[in-house]
Image (cartoon, helix red, strand yellow):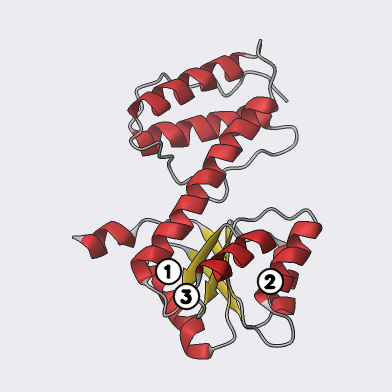
Amino acid sequence: DAAAALKDRLTAVRILVVEDDDDTRELVRATLEHAGAQVEAVATASDARREILEEAPDVLVSDILLPEENGYSLIESLRTAGITTPAIALTAYARREDAEQARTAGFQIHLPKPVDAARLIDAAARLEDALAKNRVEESLRELTPDNPQYLALRRVLAEYRAQATNGGWPILPANVRLAPGQKSRNVALIAQRLRACGGLKAPALNTRATGA
């Protein structure tokens, strides 16, 4: 059923929630954790900024009407600092101009309150899907076309694109990232995760190939 479909939608996705209302903050936290996300929740923009600078989450979910500094100011300061974490704005104002203001400030998605669980989970999953795609494409840019890992990963991606529905991408766990000096290993991990999530039949990659 619908509830079961949402349960694992955000497995291993790291999400930071910024909401000053205690009840709403705990509701959003519980909603995202039910879908498998790893959630940190804070009440102010300054606390959120500190968390992000220590370790950026995969997705940011922020209320707009925060004490001292609002959500628009928070996201604008993050974008100015070069922080590209995808973000969802939560607000009681649901007019078209409110959504446009949120996107102009730097949010990717605008959701009205009260929070609808299915819409929130779907929005976070779509942002993480896009992030997963960017990670894979970034890994390709780190390799040269004559590298065997590059060629193997291109085959994996081509097969995944052929099988994926609606242009979807799997949600990659937070620990699948490129690391300096370990590019070949990380490309192999990404390809392995793509096969696991997408049911790919591509041959296993040779993780001993050099690419760093």
Q: Quadrant of residue 89?
A: bottom right
Q: Quadrant of the C terminus?
A: top right
Residue occupying image coordinates x 46% and y 37%: 193
Side of 79 relative to 113 (left or right):
right
- Which secondary structure, mark 1? helix
Judging by the rendered image, the residue that carries numbered circle 2 is: 72
Side of 195 relative to 82 (left or right):
left
Judging by the rendered image, the residue that carries numbered circle 3 is: 29
The residues bearing labels 2 and 3 have C-alpha atoms spaced at a distance of: 21 Å
- Which secondary structure, mark 3? helix
Q: Quadrant of the N terminus?
A: bottom left
Label at residue 57? none
Q: Amino acid at mark 3?
A: Arg
On the image, the x and y values in percent for residue 146 come to: 66, 10
Camera-side residue: 26 or 188?
Answer: 26
Check disc 3: other Cα within 10 Å, few if <14, some if 14-19, many if 20+.
many
Q: Amino acid at mark 1?
A: Glu
Q: Is residue 149 above or below residue 28?
A: above
Q: CB of mark 3 within 8 Å of CB of mark 1? A: yes
Judging by the rendered image, the residue that carries numbered circle 1 is: 33
Residue occupying image coordinates x 47% and y 84%: 24
Check disc 1: other Cα within 10 Å, few if <14, some if 14-19, many if 20+.
many
Residue occupying image coordinates x 36% and y 35%: 198
